[in-house]
Image (spheres, rainbow, N blue to C red):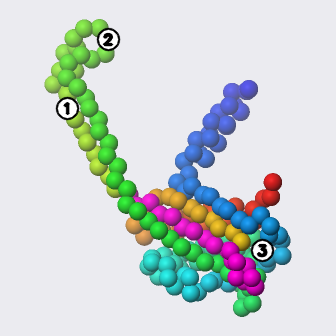
Amino acid sequence: MKPISLFALVLVVFFSSCSSVRVYSDYDKNVDFSPYKTYAYYKAGIDKVEISDLDKKRILRAIDQQMAAKGFTKSETPDLLINIFTKSREQVNVNQFNAGWGYGWGWGWNPWMMGMGGNQTTVSTSTEGTLFIDLIDAKKKEMIWQGEGIGTLTKNTDKKDEVVAEFVGKILAQYPPVKK
């Protein structure tokens, strides 16, 4: 393998592993997704979602952008109904670093390491959120596809739009499903 292509491969793996959102999807394998062209939101379901109205608007705007990019249009008589559901949990991360007393690198006693011992503990918290996007056949009232995104949320107002767009974009990238 040429050195330049090996470097490119390493970069691709590095950047793809930096993604902060993990996504999953499931769907009804007996459904033909090609006839679906229009959508509307399932208001009764979205009204029950326990997040701020501002965050709901962010999610719905991001869904609108992704659906438009896929060629869908909003309609009063839709083929699909879209519902969302969210959940979150607080995560506590504890990291300890122990720099012991005594010997340093190499053989024997190292006077430069003496007195530098000690423990350092850091504690941080983060919120992990899960966003579900459900696509429901409007005529049959049956769920035909569900996407799920799990990742770290932010309270930084300047970054919320970006985080929501990443969640929604990665989830809806899996729609329509590719049959194997």
- Judge whether 77 appears above or below 18 on screen: below
In the image, what residue type sits under mark 3? Gly
Image quadrant in which the N terminus is located = top right
Looking at the image, residue 156 sits to the left or right of residue 99; the answer is right
Q: How far apart are the two marked residues, 2 and 1, measured between alpha carbons?
A: 20 Å
**Type of residue at label 2?**
Gly
- As for residue 134 lying within the magenta part, the answer is yes
**Predominant secondary structure, magenta span:** strand
Left/right of residue 175 with respect to residue 21 in the rendered view: right
Classify residue 28 by image quadrant. Answer: bottom right
Q: Is residue 88 above or below residue 49?
A: above
Q: Earlier in the sequence, mark 3 or mark 1?
A: 3
- Which residue appears at 73% of the width and 79% of the height? 137
Q: Which residue is mark 3?
A: 71
Q: Position of residue 25 (x, y in %)?
A: 65, 61
Give the residue drawn at x 68%, y 31%: 6
Does residue 169 appear in this view? no
**177 is within the stretch colored magenta:** no
Q: Work out how far the residue at label 2 is from the one at label 3, CA to CA, in angstroms.
A: 65 Å
Crowd band around label 1 with a 10 angstrom C-alpha radius: few (<14), some (14–19), many (20+) = few
Q: Which residue is mark 1?
A: 118
Which residue range is magenta in the image? 126-143
Relative image position of residue 147 (x, y in whole percent): 63, 65
Secondary structure at badge 1 equals strand
What label sits on residue 106 in the rendered view? 2
User: Residue pushed farthest top?
Assistant: 107
Determine which quarter of the picture holds residue 99. Answer: top left
Left or right of 32? Residue 42 is left
In the structure shown, which secondary structural element does the residue marked by tag 2 occupy?
Answer: loop
Depth order, front residue of 30/179:
30
